[in-house]
Amino acid sequence: MPDGTGPPEPRPRTPRYGEGRPGPRAGGRRTADDAFEDLLDAFTTHLNEVRCLSFETQDSYAKAARAYYRWLTATEPTLGLEEASSATIRAFVTFEREQRIGAGTIATYLQALKGFYQFLLFDDPNRPNPVRGVRGPRVMPAPIDPFTEDEIRQMLSFAQRYERSSDLRRWVGYVALVIFASTGVRNAELRNLETAKVNLSRRELRVLGKGSKERIIPFGPGAAEVLRVYAAELRPRLPRSPYFLVNPASVQGPNRGRIGEMALVDLVRLLLAEAGISGRANPHRFRHSYATLTTSQTGNVELTRELLGHSDITTTSRYVHTAMKDRHLAADGVDLVPVGGATGPLAASVPAVPSPFQPPGFLGHMPRAVPVPYVGTEPWAAPPAATLAESHQLARPEEKPHGEDLQGPAESILIGAVEAARRLPPRLVVHLNPERLLEVALGSLITTGLSTDVFLAAAGAVLSWTHDLPVPIGPLLTTYGRGAAEALFQVRSTLELLGSLDPTRPRLGSLP
């Protein structure tokens, strides 16, 4: 592969052309109005050669212009494109709202029409752009929760089983997960990444980002090893293509071998679901995780901006998130309420003895939002419950007992929880993630008593062991102490409860 040195290459032609033959055109099929279609072709050529926009942006702009033109000819057949006013554009926006088109799509339509009229009225600078001054709906960005380090390790460990397997599609998916997690590239950047732009010896990718801005992204030795195995063993078995990431099923057509946008999204979603990772499964979530981890490791937001390819550091700031553990540390730092200082009627209402819904050996001073039914007869295999009771009495809530004090009991509970999980229907286990496990058990996530994090960590550890992905229990106990042991017991009880229910009941059958 090339070493990345030498003069920059010219901008490649958009992917809708392959081997000198037109493929699917931007914006979809031609309509009966040839004059408008010729204008639209000239517009997309302008977007490609002058503004250097990506094919995806060209395609969305062309679709928006065609939708607007169809609406205009249907509602105002005598009104030409150049005769439209701001009132015309507002009427189009109102029509789209009535059709229940999303706010983000309408905002994209306005951006596209603004560029379209800039191109249309270029030779007449005295004519105002009718889109100027038209306000679109307010777009509220959906909150994105980045993957944690543990989640990334869990998904990569799970997907690694497909390396050198007969399932070529999932093997390609594993490589995609590695690249997403290790470089933070966009979906389109990975799909358009050419083999010639991958330098394994220097551990670098050269990607073409938005606005035809090329950047070099380094990656670590672990990712390099995965890419070497893929390039040496799997890539020669896939369809011939200039692209690095190839769809095994794409064997013909002008763009053969190039993996489609939704095909890659569906593949990522499949692997994340199998690995038991909760939350949004869009590949763009990796970009947020990469920005957060890079900034956390280096403390340099400017470096993160360069790696992500942003022109404005304000854009980068939207990709950097604080980890939940850091939020808890901040909350603990400003918590001035004395521990154990509750007095009056509230203290009297809290039971001083273990609840029948709580495992033996734990004091009942900690209230819970929803009691967890106890299923099973001997929760403590070895050593007896008194061991944990003594360790609980010796350790104050704000202190973290040593992991070895709880290692034996916690491992016994963990083994029992894994056995209970493996007795469940395989379909349920595959789609069961830590958050769903708690939702099924409690009806909603726990918000009082022990933090949600400790329950999610315990559930994640159990499900990882169920999928034959060993997770050291020592760090879990060191981090959460006796709370981790209690959470493990409740997760085990939940799994036993699920096993005792009829799998055909709607509550279980509703899980995908």
Image: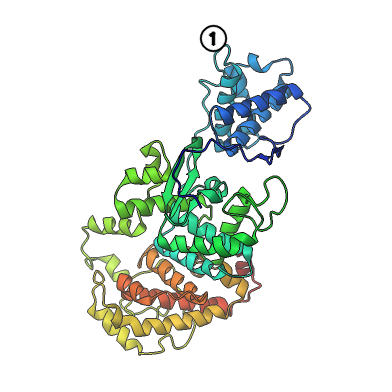
* Residue 390 image point, x, y percent: 27, 84
Q: How many marks overall?
A: 1
* Residue at image coords 60%, 36%: 13
* Residue at image coords 51%, 38%: 9
Judge by depth and name the residue closer to the eye, 48 or 104: 48
* Residue 217 image point, x, y percent: 43, 49
Secondary structure, mark 1, is: loop
Q: Is residue 490 left or right of residue 54?
A: left
* Residue at image coords 51%, 66%: 433
Judge by depth and name the residue closer to the eye, 208 or 393: 208
* Residue at image coords 32%, 54%: 296
Judge by depth and name the residue closer to the eye, 14 or 185: 14
Judge by depth and name the residue closer to the eye, 479 or 356: 479
User: As drawn, which residue projects farthest toward the right?
Assistant: 32
- The reply to whether residue 445 is visible in this rendering is no
Q: Quadrant of the C terminus?
A: bottom right
